[in-house]
Image (tube, rainbow, N blue to C red):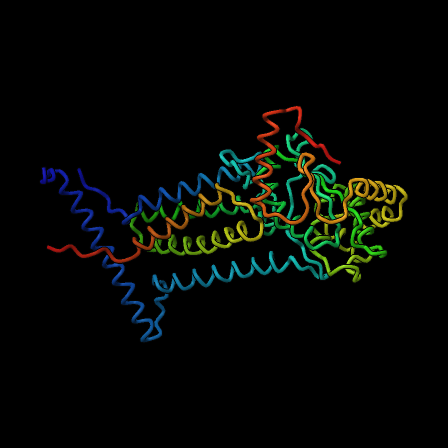
Amino acid sequence: MNERIARGRLGGPMVLLAAAGTAIAAYLSVVRASGASAVCDPSHGCDVVAASPYAVILGIPVAYLGLAYSLVLLAVTAAWWQRADRRALQAAWALLLLGTLFVAYLTFLELAVINAVCLWCASFAVTIVAGLIVAAAAIRPAPRESS
Amino acid sequence: MSHKPATDAPGRKARRAAERRDRYDAARDQRRARTSTAAGGSSWLTTRTVTAVAIAAGVVLVAVLAISQLGGRSSTTGLKDPGLEYPASIQDGTALGSATAPVVMDVWGDYQCPVCARHSLDVEPSLVNRYVIANKLRIVHHEVDILGRGGNESRLAATGGYCAKQQDRYWRYSHGVYGNQQGENRGGFSRDRLTAIAVAAGVDEAAFSSCLDSQAAADAFAATQAQGEQLGINQTPTMFLNGTRSAGLKSASDWGALVDAALAQASASPSASGSAAP
């Protein structure tokens, strides 16, 4: 009766980080769609970044791409957490590697080309990098118990 | 209290089972990787392979984007796109920001002046980011002919600014001109090249061309030039921050300190705020 279902190691923190990233991307998508300014952005960096030509890739706003990416990441991390399916962990790992490279490029654009920093985008990048670190810990074999 | 309740035992068992399975999966991956390396097998879905593929895909993705976005800053016409685009909501002709902003910075420049280009492309965006969007600062540009030395490049570029303004494309045009300097009076701002810069900024070519020849554009340039002479503008860039004159290049942080001081002064004596300039 009290039997627990086996869950993927570190799946909880991974899902939490993916959910935080999804929430940030969803908020930035709403801001983009409504044309409003982002809140809690004292330097108004998000307005400048969103107005730059780098905020759109192939006609699609980067905020929407970020939301789509985050939803997929959330799904695979949830699959790892719930079912301990290693393929889901590998998919999450691959997505987080891709995401880390991509947010590194976007951060470079903000600092070196656009000359403005969007705190919401930086927060999103932090969730991706933190997720990568947690996934790196999860993808390694669990240490053997000394008994 | 070091003993865990007995009811946790099944949970601990399940966790151990999960860990065992996890170790088994990881070991299987490693076995498969070894087998695949040794025998050229088809067990491709190992962590190492996934990592390599993801990194390769990420590097390719970023490289393609960087080439298309940053390489694209140099277009097929040989023109560079500085990649600056201020929000439409803050653009107001040759000005940026609210007309009721407590601090006004008038910038007198010459499109052939390289220091003006550095101010416009490297310093101003930070001021826009920090102050203009927050409705604390209004920046107003004025282009004059200081470096033309009898040629028409400074004048023609400045006249182009007036014409781009007629189509609400002043700032894109201005950044395009500053970003495409080719030395003073060396043909960099010929009529054809200025037209190409204007078109790249989204200006209608026919209307721009017709405007360049118009009396209204000539009069507008002459009026700005006369105003500059009246203010004794003999070097560019020359700025007036709420009427206080300053010439040459300053860093964004130096300007930030001056704008902060002007804001403090404006809030202390609101009647003294706004443009005393030009």
Q: Position of residue B141 (x, y in %)?
A: 72, 42
Q: Residue at x 64, y 51 (%)?
A: B83
Q: Position of residue B166 (x, y in %)?
A: 79, 41
Question: Residue A116 appears in which quarter of the rendering?
Answer: top right
Left or right placement of residue B14 versus residue A53 in this view: left
Q: Seen from this angle, which residue lies furthest right?
A: B215
Front residue (pair B120, A114): B120
In this rendering, the count of numbered labels is: 0
Q: Residue at x 62, y 28 (%)?
A: B266
Figure quadrant of the N terminus of chain B: top left
Q: Residue at x 31, y 56 (%)?
A: A139
Q: Position of residue A48 (x, y in %)?
A: 58, 42
Q: Seen from this angle, which residue lies furthest bottom?
A: B39
Residue B204 in sight in this render: no
Residue A122 in sight in this render: yes
Front residue (pair B55, B212): B212
Left or right placement of residue A108 versus residue B6 in this view: right
Q: Position of residue A89 (x, y in %)?
A: 34, 53
Front residue (pair B18, A134): A134
User: In the figure, A90 relative to A47: above or below?
Assistant: below
Left or right placement of residue A146 versus residue B223 in this view: left
Question: Residue B112 appears in which quarter of the rendering?
Answer: bottom right
Figure quadrant of the C terminus of chain B: top right
User: In the figure, B174 relative to B28: above or below?
Assistant: above
